[in-house]
Amino acid sequence: MPIVVNLDVMMAKRKMSLNELSQKVDLTLSNLSILKTGKAKAIRFSTLEAICKALNCQPGDILEYIED
């Protein structure tokens, strides 16, 4: 898939656990884990906004396009 989710990288840079992020963005651990592992098919802008706010980053820090 040409869109890569770098959520784990940003979480490591901010020293934030999946549990902590889950609480801050009000998402279940399972949904956040699906996103973190790159298995998600879509993401809502409101979710992306909440994650960016919690991690103090930009959407481009989390999502990356890589050509096949």
Image (cartoon, rainbow, N blue to C red):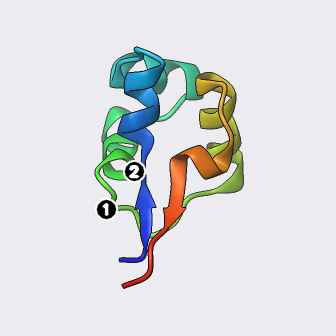
Q: Which residue, given by chain and number where applicable, does mark 1 sit on?
A: 39
Q: Is residue 65 above or below residue 53?
A: below
Provide the secondary structure element on which disc 1 rests: loop
Left or right of 17? Residue 60 is: right
Circle 1 Cα neighbour tier, 10 Å, few/some/many (<14 / 14–19 / ≥20): few
The residue shown at (42%, 47%) is 6
* Depth order, front residue of 57/23: 57
Q: Which mark is residue 67?
A: none
- For the C terminus, the quadrant is bottom left
Residue 66: x and y in percent read 45, 72
Instruction: Read off the residue under disc 2.
Output: 35
Q: Please state if 41 lies on the left or on the right of 63 as rendered.
A: left
10 Å crowding of disc 2: few (<14), some (14-19), many (20+): some
Q: Quadrant of residue 5?
A: bottom left
Where does the image place residue 17, in percent across and percent down from the top left?
35, 19
Residue 67 position, x and y percent, is 44, 81
At 58% from the left and 25% from the top, the residue drawn is 55
Q: Identity of the amino acid at label 1?
A: Lys
Work out which residue is located at the far front of the displayed protein and give it: 67
Q: Quadrant location of residue 29?
A: top left
- Callout 1–callout 2 Cβ contact below 8 Å: yes
**Secondary structure type for disc 2:** helix
Please identify the quarter of the rendering in which residue 58 is found. Answer: top right
**In terms of depth relative to the viewer, which is nearer, 42 or 62?**
62
Q: Which amino acid type is marked by label 2?
A: Leu
Residue 20 vertical placement versus 1 (above, below)? above
Q: Between marks 1 and 2, how big is the CA–CA gap?
A: 6 Å
Q: Quadrant of the N terminus?
A: bottom left
- Give the image location of residue 13, x and y in percent: 44, 23
